[in-house]
Image (cartoon, rainbow, N blue to C red):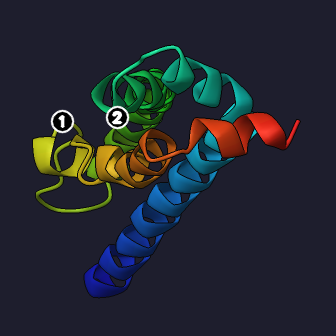
Amino acid sequence: MAALAGAFGILAGTLAVLGLYGVIAYMVARRRNEIGVRIALGASRGRVVQLVLGEAVVVLAIGLAIGIGLSIWAGRAAATMLYGLKPWDPLTLGPATAVLASYAPARRAARLDPMTALREE
């Protein structure tokens, strides 16, 4: 039963990372013209990556705040039913690869050719 619960936890984490990747990729695609203008006006590639990752961190922080609160609440309920489960387990609550999911769209935005982005409008 614990192995099945662990497998579902890994599946849920994978789906969360894929969902975050999709949201950030959509955000980059939607703001393609703005990013193209920023690059054309002299923004460095690092600054564009920082812009995209900064927005990803905001989305991630909101999701983590809600998710950690709900997981602590669910952990307390499950602690009475399972032996040795702690609601404040840092390995369970820590964000593992969510920022890495945001890095690929950020790099794609940084490599954007400003002339191509501006011609599409």
**Residue 50 lies in what quarter of the image?**
top left
Look at label 2 and name its amino acid.
Answer: Ile
Q: Mark 2 points at which residue?
A: 72
Judged from the image, the secondary structure of the residue bearing numbered disc 2 is helix
Secondary structure, mark 1, is loop
Residue 96 vertical position relative to residue 61 in the rendered view, above or below: below
Q: Which of marks 2 and 1 is nearer the N terminus?
A: 2
Q: In this rendering, does residue 43 appear at all?
A: yes
Rendered residue at 50%/56% (across/down): 16
Q: Which amino acid does label 1 sit on?
A: Trp
Res 80 seen here: no
> Which one is nearer the viewer's eye here, 37 or 23?
37
Foreground pick, 29 / 23: 29
Tell whether label 1 touches label 2 (CB within 8 Å): yes
Q: Locate residue 31, reporting x and y percent.
A: 70, 31
Marks 2/1: CA–CA distance: 7 Å
Between 97 and 78, the one lying in front of the other is: 97
- In-front residue for pair 113/104: 113
Spot occupied by residue 12 in the image (x, y as percentages of width and height):
47, 65
- For the point 27% across and 79% down, the residue is 2
Residue corresponding to mark 1: 88
Q: Position of residue 1 (x, y in %)?
A: 33, 85
Relative to residue 95, is residue 44 depicted above or below? above
Outermost residue, top side: 41
Residue at 30% over, 75% down: 6
> Looking at the picture, how far across and down is residue 91, in whole percent?
13, 50
